[in-house]
């Protein structure tokens, strides 16, 4: 018990000593660097939501979000992130020139049955910085396949007697 109290005392004491040795804040008259100018790139999507509709389990759904750079400098999309591992976006890696268009493709894994309600977060150098795209739809279960029938007799075939 003494060792625990002593260790806590030493830890607290060293925190106070370390904190006391920090330098005071610089006065407001010191020169500060100017903030970086805001980006003039702008990303404008045709739509912010894509509806897959009703799909069968195991299908191959691919959605697309078309966009245009309506700004005055090249648009750079640094990242697109799906809200889970079943939503996989792909996007142009090269800068999009002012006035040019591009497409973000979203693939959804249809192994999961039920409603789709996912998001894709697009990070870029646009004025907005981050845009959230939505995908929705419904995945229906594939029809169940009958297992191999085994030794079932055919309709009207004679049945063997077993003892």
Image: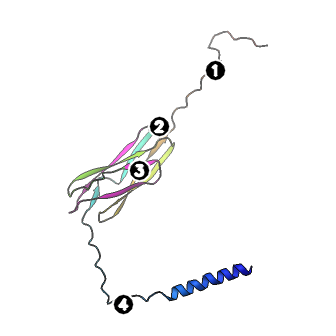
Give the residue displayed 41% in from the left and 88% down from the top: 25
Task: Name the residue nearer the viewer: 148 or 159.
Answer: 148
Q: CA distance from mark 2 to mark 4?
A: 64 Å
Q: Secondary structure at mark 1?
A: loop
The dot on residue 108 is none
Q: Callout 2: few (<14), some (14-19), or many (20+) C-alpha neighbours within 10 Å?
A: some
Q: Position of residue 53 (x, y in %)?
A: 41, 43
Report the front residue among 12 and 114.
12
Disc 4 target residue: 27
The image shows residue 59 at horizontal and vertical percentages of 44, 37
Q: Earlier in the sequence, mark 4 or mark 3?
A: 4
Find the distance from the CA under tag 4 to the CA under tag 1: 87 Å
Gap between marks 1 and 2, in whole Å? 27 Å
Disc 2 element:
loop
Residue 46 versus residue 56 in the image, above or below? below
Residue of label 1: 150
Q: Which residues are magenta?
A: 60-89
Give the mark, 1 or 3, whose residue is nearer the N terminus: 3
Q: Residues within 10 Å of mark 4 (few under 14, many from 20)?
A: few
The magenta stretch spans residue 132: no
Q: In the displayed structure, does residue 89 sit left or right of residue 22?
A: left
In the visual, does 85 lie left or right of 77?
right
Which residue bears the numbered disc 2? 58
């Amino acid at each position: 018990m003494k060792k625990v109290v002593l260790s806590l005392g030493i830890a607290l004491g060293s925190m106070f000593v370390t904190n006391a040795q920090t330098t005071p804040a610089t006065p407001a008259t010191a020169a500060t660097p100017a903030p970086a100018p805001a980006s003039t790139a702008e990303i404008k999507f045709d739509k912010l939501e894509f509806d897959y509709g009703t799909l069968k389990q195991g299908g191959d759904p691919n959605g697309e979000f078309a966009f245009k750079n309506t700004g005055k400098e090249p648009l750079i999309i640094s990242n697109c992130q799906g809200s889970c591992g079943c939503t996989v976006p792909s996007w142009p890696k090269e800068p999009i020139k002012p006035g040019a268009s591009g497409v973000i493709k979203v693939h959804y894994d249809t192994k999961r049955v039920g409603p789709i309600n996912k998001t894709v977060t697009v990070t870029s150098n646009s004025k907005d910085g981050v845009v959230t795209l939505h995908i929705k739809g419904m995945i229906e279960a594939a029809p169940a396949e009958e297992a191999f029938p085994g030794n079932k007799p055919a309709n009207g075939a004679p049945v063997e007697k077993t003892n």
